[in-house]
C-alpha cells in the first residue's frame, strides 16, 4: 500500500506541525487541563495502589529496582520500573505530600493534550487539532488518572508521543520514524506490561502503510521489536500474573472498557458494587450508556471518514488493539484480571478520533452537530462528577481514620480483614499496630464463620477493633461481620464508603 504524500503536501504538513503547539487555542486547552486536574488534587486520601507507589519508592535505589523484578518486599512483581524511577527522583526534590506525589500526573495530562492536538493536526486540520485538544482536556478518564500517584498518566503521554511520531512519518513530514519514536516506545515498554499492545499497534501500521519503503523504518522497527520481546520474556519469567479477582461480568467487559475510556469511572459501578452485585450493578448506569452509544458511533464514524487513509489505519489500529488484546489476554490466561486503566495507551488515539469527528464545519449536518453536543455532554458530566468526588468508588480511609482517632487511643491495635486493608492501615495509621484476620487467603463462608469468629484474638484486651475493607476478598457475604455483631456486645461501630469498623467487647469469662 503506497501512501507517500507529494512534496507540496509534505511541506504543508511541516508548516502545520511547527506551529500547532503554539496555537493559542491548544495552549489554552493545556492550561484548562492543568486547572481541572489541580482542582481538589489532595481531596481524596491515597488509595491502595498509590500507597504501593509510595512504599516502593521509599526503598533505597538498588533495593527498589530489585523489588520491582522480584517482589521480595511483598509489593509484587507486576510492574515495570520507569514510573517508579521518575517518581523517586521527583519526591527527592518535592517531598512526599499528597500534592507532590500527584503533581507529575497533572503535568503529564497537559502534555497529553498538546500531543494529541498535534497528532490530529498532522492527520486532519488545524480546526480538528483544536477540537481534539479540548476533548482531551475534558476527558474524565485522563482527568481521573492525572490525579493519581500511578503510572497511567505516563502511559498516556508516551502513547500520545509515539502516535504523533508515527503520524508524522506516515503522513510524510518525516523521512523516518526517528529516535523520538523509538524513545517513546521504549518508555511505554518500561512503564507497563500491557503497553506491548499499543507498541505492537504502531509497528503494525508501519507494515501496513509503508511496505514498499521498509528501509526507512526497519531499524526503528527492529530495535522496538527487541524491546517488545524483552518485556514479553520478563512477563513470562518474572511478573506475577495474579493481579486481582475477576468479575463475573465478562459479557460486558469489552463495551465497559470502551465506555470508561470515554466517560471515566463515575458513570460506572464501583469495584465493590461489581463484586457484590455482579452484572446487576451495571443496570443503573445502562440508560445513559445506551443513549450515548448512537452519538458516539456517529462521531467516531465521522472522524474516521474525515481522516486520510493513513490516519484511518493508524488511529483504527491504535484504538482497537490496546482495548481488545487485554480482554483476550484475560481469556487466555484466566489468572489475570482486566481493568480499563490497562487500555490507557489507547486513550489519546480514541480522543483524537472523537476530536476529528466533533469538528464542526459549515457543511456539517444537524446529526453531526447534535451527536457532538451529546458526546461533549458525556465528557463534561463525567469530569464534573469526578471533580466533586475524586475518591469515587474507593474506601473512605480518611473518614475511618477520623473515627478511630475519636473513639480509640492512638496506639490501640486493630484487626484488618484483607491484605489491602493492612497496607492502607500501616500507611495512614502508622502508630496503630494491626493484625490481619482472618489470615491471608482465607475466605469466610457459612461453613467456617463460626470457627473464625470463635478464634477472634482478644489477646487479653477487653475489646477489639475490627476494620473491614475490600470485603469481597475475605468476607464476600459479610458473614463474619454479621456473626461478630450477633455474638459479641458492641462498643461502637462505623461505616463509610468501602470500609466498616466494628468494636466488640471480649466475652465475659464463665466462672
Image (cartoon, rainbow, N blue to C red):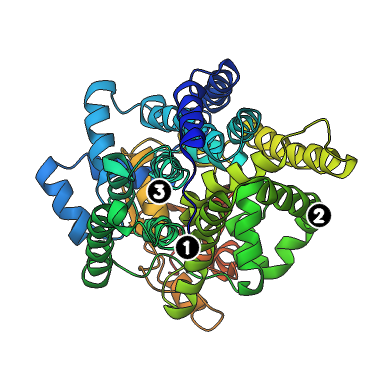
Please identify the quarter of the rendering in which residue 234 is found: bottom left
Query: Which residue is farthest right?
Result: 366
Q: Tag 3 or tag 2, which sits nearer the N-term?
A: 3
Q: Is residue 437 above or below residue 351?
A: below
| Front in this rendered view, residue 275 or 467 | 275
Marking on residue 507: 1
User: Pointer 3: what residue?
Assistant: 49
Q: Position of residue 375 (x, y in %)?
A: 75, 42
Q: Secondary structure at mark 2?
A: helix
Between marks 3 and 1 in the image, the one whose residue lies nearer the viewer: 3
Q: CA distance from mark 2 to mark 3?
A: 35 Å
Q: Tag 2 or tag 1, which sits nearer the N-term?
A: 2
Q: Secondary structure at mark 3?
A: helix
Q: Position of residue 149 (x, y in %)?
A: 39, 38
User: Pointer 2: what residue?
Assistant: 294
| Front in this rendered view, residue 459 or 510 | 459
**Residue at (64%, 47%) from the top-left corner?**
262
Q: CA distance from mark 3 to mark 1?
A: 37 Å
State if disc 3 and disc 2 touch (CB < 8 Å): no
Q: Secondary structure at mark 1?
A: loop
Q: Is residue 299 above or below residue 509?
A: above
Q: Residues within 10 Å of mark 2 (few under 14, many from 20)?
A: some
Q: Tag 1 or tag 3, which sits nearer the N-term?
A: 3
**Residue at (22%, 61%) from the top-left corner?**
226
- The answer to whether residue 325 is left or right of residue 306 is left
State if disc 1 and disc 3 touch (CB < 8 Å): no
Does residue 2 appear in the picture of this structure?
A: yes
| Front in this rendered view, residue 4 or 457 | 4
Q: Is residue 167 above or below residue 131?
A: below
Amino acid at each position: 500500500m503506497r501512501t507517500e504524500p507529494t512534496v507540496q503536501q509534505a511541506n504543508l504538513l511541516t508548516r502545520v506541525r511547527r506551529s500547532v503547539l503554539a496555537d493559542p487555542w491548544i495552549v489554552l486547552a493545556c492550561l484548562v487541563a492543568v486547572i481541572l486536574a489541580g482542582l481538589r488534587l489532595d481531596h481524596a486520601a491515597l488509595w491502595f495502589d498509590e500507597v504501593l507507589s509510595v512504599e516502593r519508592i521509599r526503598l533505597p535505589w538498588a533495593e527498589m529496582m530489585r523489588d520491582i523484578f522480584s517482589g521480595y518486599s511483598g509489593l509484587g512483581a507486576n510492574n515495570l520500573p520507569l514510573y517508579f524511577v521518575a517518581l523517586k527522583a521527583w519526591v527527592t526534590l518535592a517531598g512526599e505530600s499528597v500534592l507532590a506525589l500527584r503533581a507529575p500526573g497533572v503535568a503529564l495530562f497537559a502534555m497529553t493534550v498538546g500531543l494529541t492536538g498535534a497528532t490530529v493536526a498532522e492527520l486532519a486540520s488545524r480546526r480538528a487539532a483544536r477540537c481534539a485538544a479540548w476533548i482531551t482536556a475534558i476527558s474524565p478518564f485522563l482527568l481521573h488518572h492525572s490525579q493519581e500517584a500511578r503510572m497511567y498518566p505516563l502511559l498516556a503521554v508516551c502513547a500520545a508521543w509515539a502516535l504523533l511520531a508515527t503520524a508524522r512519518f506516515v503522513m510524510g513530514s518525516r523521512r523516518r520514524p526517528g529516535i523520538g519514536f523509538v524513545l517513546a516506545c521504549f518508555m511505554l515498554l518500561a512503564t507497563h506490561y500491557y503497553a506491548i499492545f499499543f507498541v505492537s499497534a504502531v509497528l503494525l501500521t508501519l507494515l501496513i502503510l509503508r511496505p514498499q519503503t521498509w528501509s526507512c523504518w526497519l531499524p526503528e522497527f527492529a530495535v522496538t521489536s527487541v524491546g517488545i520481546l524483552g518485556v514479553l520474556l520478563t512477563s513470562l519469567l518474572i511478573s506475577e500474573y495474579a493481579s486481582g479477582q475477576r468479575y463475573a461480568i465478562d459479557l460486558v467487559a469489552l463495551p465497559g472498557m470502551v465506555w470508561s475510556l470515554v466517560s471515566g469511572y463515575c458513570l460506572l459501578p464501583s469495584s465493590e458494587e461489581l463484586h457484590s452485585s455482579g452484572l446487576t450493578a451495571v443496570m443503573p448506569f445502562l440508560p445513559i450508556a445506551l443513549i450515548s452509544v448512537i452519538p458516539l458511533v456517529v462521531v467516531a464514524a465521522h472522524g474516521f471518514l474525515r481522516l486520510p487513509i493513513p490516519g484511518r489505519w493508524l488511529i483504527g489500529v491504535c484504538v482497537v488493539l490496546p482495548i481488545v488484546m487485554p480482554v483476550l489476554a484475560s481469556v487466555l490466561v484466566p489468572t489475570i484480571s482486566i481493568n480499563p486503566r490497562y487500555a490507557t495507551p489507547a486513550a489519546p488515539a480514541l480522543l483524537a478520533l472523537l476530536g476529528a469527528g466533533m469538528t464542526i464545519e459549515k457543511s456539517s449536518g444537524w446529526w453531526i452537530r447534535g451527536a457532538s453536543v451529546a458526546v461533549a455532554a458525556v465528557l463534561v458530566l463525567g469530569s464534573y462528577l469526578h471533580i466533586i468526588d475524586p475518591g469515587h468508588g474507593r474506601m473512605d480511609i480518611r473518614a475511618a481514620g477520623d473515627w478511630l482517632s475519636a473513639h480509640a487511643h492512638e496506639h490501640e491495635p486493630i484487626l484488618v480483614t484483607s491484605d489491602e486493608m493492612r497496607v492502607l492501615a500501616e500507611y495512614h495509621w502508622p502508630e496503630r499496630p494491626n493484625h490481619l484476620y482472618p489470615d491471608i487467603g482465607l475466605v469466610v463462608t457459612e461453613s467456617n464463620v463460626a470457627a473464625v469468629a470463635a478464634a477472634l484474638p482478644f489477646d487479653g484486651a477487653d475489646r477489639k477493633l475490627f476494620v473491614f475493607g475490600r470485603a469481597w476478598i475475605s468476607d464476600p457475604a459479610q458473614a463474619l461481620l454479621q456473626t461478630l455483631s450477633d455474638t459479641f456486645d458492641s462498643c461502637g461501630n462505623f461505616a463509610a464508603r468501602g470500609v466498616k469498623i466494628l468494636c466488640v467487647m471480649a466475652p465475659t469469662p464463665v466462672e
